[in-house]
Image (cartoon, rainbow, N blue to C red):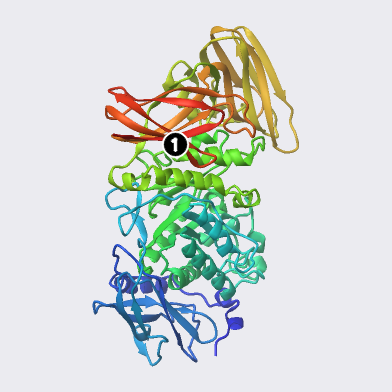
Amino acid sequence: MLTQNWLLGALVLASFCAFTASDTFAKSNLQTAIGMHAPRTTRSFPRIEATFHIPNLEGDPLDFEANDIRAQIRLPDGKSLSLPAFFDGDDVWRMRHTPTAPGNYEVVGITRNGEKLNVAATPAQFKVNGASDAGFIGIDPKNPLRFSFDSGARYYPLGTNQAWMSGKTGEYQTRFAKVGASGQNWSRVWMNHWDGKNLDWASNNKGGFSLDAARRWDEVVEGAAKSGVYFQMVTQHHGQYSSRVNPNWDSNPYNTKNGGFLASPTDFFTDERARTLTKRKLRYAIARYGYSPHILAWELWNEVQFSDAANEKKWDIVAQWHREMSEFLRSQDAYGHLITTSSEAPPEVFASVDYYQRHSYPSNLIAEVSQAPFVGPQWPQKPAFIGEYGSDNTGDRPDEWTMHSGLWASLFSDAAGAAQYWYNDKVEDSNLYHHFSSATDFLKAANFATIDAKTPFHPAPVSIETPMRGPLFLSPGGGWENVTQSDFDLSKAADVNAFGRFPRFFQGQNHHDMNPNPLILHLNAPSTGELRIRLTQIAKAGANLRVTVGDKTTEFPFAATTNDLSEAKTLTVPLSAGAQTISIENTGQDWVVLRDISVPGASMLLDGFAKTTPTCALGWFYHRANIETANPTTQSGGTAKIATMQPGNYAVTWWDTVAGKPLKTETARADQSGLTLQIPSISRDIAVWAVRQ
């Protein structure tokens, strides 16, 4: 008789499985699995589940190579489907299936390694009828950059990360109920050990396979389904195999120091035993949870760039691991769930997954999230969105309004979904759910999903005029990289946009080759004022910024310190009116991180974005100075022109982004140059949609 106590430690203590044997199994079963995929139709029905007992089973019940236990199901059309079953303690096994058609279903047999067992399932027969939903989520067959349900309806992910909680029973159901009630339809949950959700890393840190963790995931999956949330199941996170970034390596049960079998975190990607055990975990997840349409995707890694292997630039083994696990999932998952990973990594790491993700914590959040991620010929066409966002580490902006502005700005990029906020605890503790309700209600009122499924929205040029001017904020968006353009004419929109690619790390003498020339800004200041340079971090080796305006030079020295200094610093230099050239260089020892550079009076008070079809426009406009402040005091209106619109009359609805309701309706006119809108006076932001009459 097998018990859960026997299982604890079984995976870690199991004998080595040769890679050749594992590879042979995958090849021999790939064709079988492909021939037994669940039929995909335009809808799905609630799951059916059968239980059976296998007493005195020989070998490890979690080793699918030794014990490939399957249930054979007769479908309403008379065809058969073979689904993997999962072990649930003692001698108990279960099978779960999501029907895709009404009618009679019957479990007609249980097999072990293809041989029929003399065991009976309870119940064995099911009558499926009643209400159905839209099915599983995949890549839109008509648009490789978007998601859709099996029904053909657009799926536009919008939500918050719910990576972990305290570990209490029922808390995911409670949280997902709030998430779903606010209109969110996406989340992301980690398979981590500190709240008891890592299948192969029990909370007591002795390794093994935890059925308690497996049952906790039942709560996650069922809670998401009940609340209309679709989530990514993150099967690995960077800390498990990092000795540098959020490291958990010292407590990892696979570490030889803890009685495991891996000498270093990097070995995880190549070690045969580690790969075999990872496949067991994935196969178990498929058998137990793969029935659910509410698993949007299997996410192979969270931020694999922070693993030791990536830090050592061993991207080849990281990419190979992703290929191997992606192929394995596709060979075993009868429902064909999507596969993803989240990383700042070379394209080859993403080559084997179905959609892209990146995470974003920039100094200029609006500029960052309003851009489509992963663009360019090196990134083949796949859906993409930002899976985590938040403010940088300066801590000088209110969390609520950082979250608000990042969410709304992201809706107008060409990404397949919104940017997804990371700090779920801040949303919960401050009850910020209404921000998501407002955004989702806006998209519903504008009929976004239905329109986008027929004629996709794309970002459109927007020009804005305001009665008064404010500061122009130049925010670098690059990272640790070489400077490719160091001379900018701020009278040219192309140069202002190009500054968004300038590296945030402004190098000194230690890496002079990365930034060999001064940063040059040409501008025509409309009035006297102050040039402001804001820094968020200074390297411990120290730095020195030399700012020259005309014939006057100002030095800003930063002495060496014990550690890198993470603290907001604002440097000011007086500016006179008129045409002038500004030179900024770092003559000190090491880098500083630039948050932004502001030029007084060089920009309109309002800015914004739009996305359009030929006859419909969605827009968002914000007050540059107030969008991320807690209590804005100034207001401005203006005129916006949205290009690419068909000429004609348009019905216009303005939307209060905080209260989540329409403000007013009116009509507007589009000519050959675009749709002209009169922006109401606002202190923070406002949204709009317009439909051609």
For the point 50% across and 82% down, the residue is: 60
- Give the image location of residue 399, x and y in percent: 62, 41
For the point 32% across and 64% down, the residue is: 43
Q: Is residue 28 left or right of residue 563?
A: left
Residue that label 1 marks = 371
Which image quarter: residue 214?
A: bottom right
Which image quarter: residue 35?
A: bottom left
Tell me: residue 321, above or below residue 447.
below
- How many labels sit on residues? 1
Q: Is residue 156 left or right of residue 587?
A: left
Which image quarter: residue 116?
A: bottom left
Residue 650 visible in the picture: yes
- Give the image location of residue 434, x and y in percent: 55, 47
Tell me: residue 308, above or below residue 8.
above
Q: Which kind of residue does numbered mark 1 sit on?
A: Gln
The kind of secondary structure element at disc 1 is loop
Tell me: residue 186, above or below residue 127.
above
Q: Is residue 598 left or right of residue 30?
A: right
- Give the image location of residue 480, x and y in percent: 55, 36
- Binning the other alpha carbons within 10 Å of mark 1 as few (below 14), some (14 to 19) or many (20 upward) gives some
Q: Nearer the viewer, residue 35 or 290?
A: 290
- Give the image location of residue 210, x and y in percent: 58, 74
Residue 345 visible in the picture: no
